[in-house]
Amino acid sequence: MNARPSSGNYDRSVSTSSASSYSSSTDSVASGGYSMDSPPVASVEVLRCLRCAKCVETTTTDDLASTGMVQIGYNIYYCSSCAKMVGYK
């Protein structure tokens, strides 16, 4: 009993997409609206004291001294009172 159909029954055509429908990646980047003349975007950061967990919201353009926080490492901060107590300020 041969249950397999013959190989002539299958459609072997392969559909291909045309190259004209492909949009280049440079077109999407150029239309993204980014330019060298655009002003920098300030993002909001939350600074938390490592010792007492005091929390301060600031923007990336703010000065750290005006926020009352002292940076002791990469994304590690003391508030001014804890920094004075530990000896950083």
Image: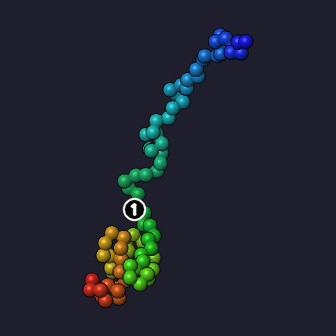
Q: Which residue is mark 1?
A: 40
- Badge 1 amino acid: Pro
Q: Establish if 73 lies above or below 53.
A: above
x and y percentages locating residue 68 in the rendered image: 37, 83
Q: Nearer the viewer, residue 31 or 49?
A: 49
For the N terminus, the quadrant is top right
* CA neighbours of label 1 inside 10 A, class few (<14), some (14 to 19), many (20+): few
Q: Position of residue 52 (x, y in %)?
A: 41, 84
Asked which colour scheme the image uses, the reply is rainbow
Please tell me whether residue 54 is drawn above or below residue 43 in the rendered image: below
Residue drawn at x 43%, y 81% as measured from the top left: 53
Q: Which residue occupies 50% across, 26% down?
A: 19
Instruction: Write the residue at 64% across / 16% down.
Output: 11
Give the quarter of the figure containing the C terminus: bottom left
Q: Residue 84 falls in which quadrant of the image?
A: bottom left
Circle 1: element type: loop
In the visual, does 21 lie left or right of 63? right
- Foreground residue among 56 and 19: 56
Q: Nearer the viewer, residue 43 or 55?
A: 55
Q: Position of residue 59 (x, y in %)?
A: 42, 72
